[in-house]
Amino acid sequence: MERRSWSRDELLVAFRLFCATPFGRLHRGNPDIIKLASELGRTPSAVAMKACNFAAFDPKLKARGINGLANSAKADRLLWDEFQSDSVSVAVQCEEAHSLISKSTSLEGEDDLPQMPIGPSEVERRVKVRRIQSFFRAAVLSSYDFKCAISGLEIQSLLVASHIMPWARFEQRRADPRNGISLNSIYDQAFDKGLLTFDEEYRVVLSPELKMPGSSQFQHDVFIEVEGRQMTLPSRFVPDPAALAHHRENIFMKRKLAGTNGMVLND
């Protein structure tokens, strides 16, 4: 097949592939890569190698001695840097490029968006939100190999890509995988409400509310038993220590202080 340069859209879908696929599955035999290669008119090997190029820029993968290809294109580095500075914009572009190139032209559920009575601008906003959510979930869960970082649960329908710095208040971190942790639904709720957090060593820290005398057996087994356990770190996009510090100081501590005063704060 004739060698040709990678277009911007092709580069975006290759980056999306890197983010949404566990690193160990980025090989030419992966059915998803074979399908994408067919859509791009490239070989599965070329697509897999292009996606693997981005490994050269992730600190966790570099620490494992994985450096991508020596001849990673300048455009690969520029896209990685662009993602670091504006993950939301790049995430949306990745999903848009994929919808253009893939034979499946819409996100799951996108066709169900009501057209009336909301106007075109609201439909566009909701589609953008779904694209950000889709990118973020895939990038976070795949980095944890589709397992809960605390319990190891592998049932995908029960896993949540939890935002560390809240979605509502930190728009610029909405698509950043380093602002996410793969948690099962109950740990996600506890984390979101400030009942559970992680220390500087990524160990589970519980609010006093979860350790009250006379706790049920369920509460003991699910929460008290995991206190002090280190989360299973992802293969890439390790949680940002600054984001976790924000969670400890502004969500967990608020909840802890509120509990001390006999009140509950809703963040």
Image (tube, grey):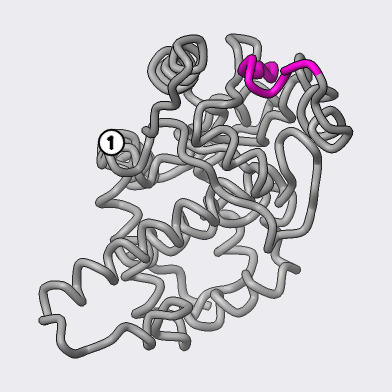
Q: Looking at the image, is 59 positioned above or below residue 217? A: above
Q: Is residue 5 visible?
A: no
The span picked out in magenta is 203-213
Q: In the displayed structure, does residue 132 sit left or right of residue 180?
A: left
The image shows a total of numbered marks equal to 1
Q: Looking at the image, is 161 positioned above or below residue 92? A: above
- Label 1: element kind: loop
Residue 256, percent across and down?
A: 51, 14
Residue at point 83%, 32% (across, down)? 216
Residue 117, percent across and down?
A: 15, 87
Q: Check disc 1 and give the amino acid type.
A: Phe
Crowdedness near tag 1: few (<14), some (14–19) or many (≥20) residues, C-alpha within 10 Å = few
Q: In the displayed structure, does residue 227 sit left or right of residue 256?
A: right
Q: Can residue 53 be seen in this view?
A: yes
Residue at point 34%, 35% (across, down)? 84
Determine the image quadrant of residue 181: top right
Residue at point 33%, 37% (across, down)? 173
Residue 7, percent across and down?
A: 31, 65
Image quarter of the C terminus: top left
Q: In the displayed structure, does residue 170 sit left or right of residue 230?
A: left
259 or 142, nearer to the observer: 259
Residue 68, percent across and down?
A: 58, 39
Judging by the rendered image, the residue that carries numbered circle 1 is 170
Q: Residue 156 lies in magenta, yes or no?
A: no
Q: Looking at the image, is 197 positioned above or below residue 61? A: above
Residue at point 50%, 33% (across, down)? 193
Determine the image quadrant of residue 133: bottom left
1 or 171, nearer to the observer: 171
